[in-house]
Amino acid sequence: MALTGTRKWLNEVIFGTDTPAGKYFDVVLIWTILLSVALVLLASVQSWWVRYGDIFFALEWFFTALFTVEYLTRIYCAQDRRSYIFSFYGIVDLLAILPSYLALIYTGASYLMVIRLLRVLRIFRILKLVRYLSDANLLVRSLWQARRRILVFYASVLVLCIIFGSVMFVVEGPKNGFTSIPKSIYWTIVTITTVGFGDITPHTAWGQTIASMTMLIGYSIIAVPTGIVTAELAHELGREKQLARCHNCGRAGHDADSEYCKHCGYKLEDFEPTHGD
């Protein structure tokens, strides 16, 4: 069913970016999100909360009210309300306001820690920025296309970690800190990712040899997921260029932000690589 009247205008402003009002709405919303996230970060500093707790509390509810109005308005003017509510962005929009209202339920003193944890969940508001970053959407699509290869890669790394962890448990043993196979696997993961916390270290010659092999393997496999994602990114960029086709000469291969055809100079029609909500 086609939207009409106020719903149509609100839909163009909130979900669209082609009109001046829509662009202005996006800019204002982005700054509001950034300010609300900064507020959450500052409120987590205990000394600041003691001094400015009342101000933080009032500002938090101010932002919560704004995002609540925005969420309800999105539902009201969405082309398909059910699709929006259960979409990724719809869930993120709900998570941006839900913790504030959940905190009202836990009013007892014994639940103060729960309330503080719920406050941290408001950081999910930063995810609301994703819909305004075309490059972020491109990265998400690339990761989704490469999900099977990434899953196979991580499964292979997990098998290696289990094997090396089990071997280190046998070689080093509890006396050197490798008290169990799971803890030995933890050491392997820390080592193979080149993090190296140093809380567990091998002491025997064989253990140090295995550790050296693990470190070298870690450096070798770092490039694998990077190559997978890079290949998918290149594919997505090529696909977007093909979508930007000139209606005058019919040739494709233009950048997503091109305004004129690089072959005939004809003005390109508006091209939007993402589909919004």
Image (cartoon, rainbow, N blue to C red):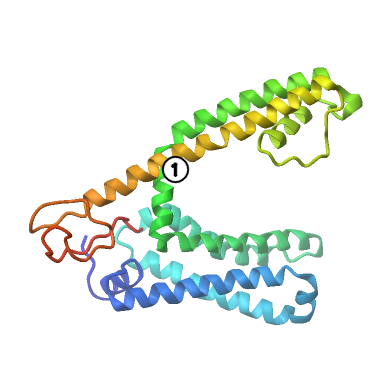
Q: Residue at x 46, y 38 (%)?
A: 227
Where is residue 97? Give x, y as percent: 55, 65
Query: With 254 as the anchor, is 54 left or right in this view?
Result: right
Where disc 1 sits, the SS reads: helix
Number of marks in the image?
1
Along the line of sight, which residue is nearer the eye, 264 or 45? 264
Q: Residue at x 39, y 66 (%)?
A: 74
Work out which residue is located at the far right of the displayed protein and give it. 175
Which quadrant of the rendered structure holds the C terminus? bottom left
Does residue 85 appear in this view? Answer: no
Judge whether 145 appears above or below 126 on screen: above
| The image quarter in which residue 77 lies | bottom left
Q: Residue at x 23, y 55 (%)?
A: 254
Which quadrant of the rendered structure holds the N terminus? bottom left
Where is residue 49? Give x, y as percent: 76, 75
Work out which residue is located at the far left of the displayed protein and give it. 248
Amino acid type for the residue under numbered disc 1: Leu
Along the line of sight, which residue is nearer the eye, 216 or 154? 216
Q: Residue at x 41, y 52 (%)?
A: 87
Judge whether 168 appears above or below 201 on screen: above
Residue where numbered disc 1 is placed: 143
Query: With 257 as the anchor, is 53 left or right in this view?
Result: right
| The image quarter in which residue 90 lies | bottom left
Judge whether 141 appears above or below 96 on screen: above
Where is residue 18? Give x, y as percent: 27, 70
Query: With 275 as the anchor, is 44 left or right in this view?
Result: right
Where is residue 275? Give x, y as percent: 31, 56
Other residues around mark 1 within 10 Å, as few (<14) / some (14–19) / many (≥20): some
Along the line of sight, which residue is nearer the eye, 124 or 94? 124
Judge whether 90 appears above or below 3 on screen: above
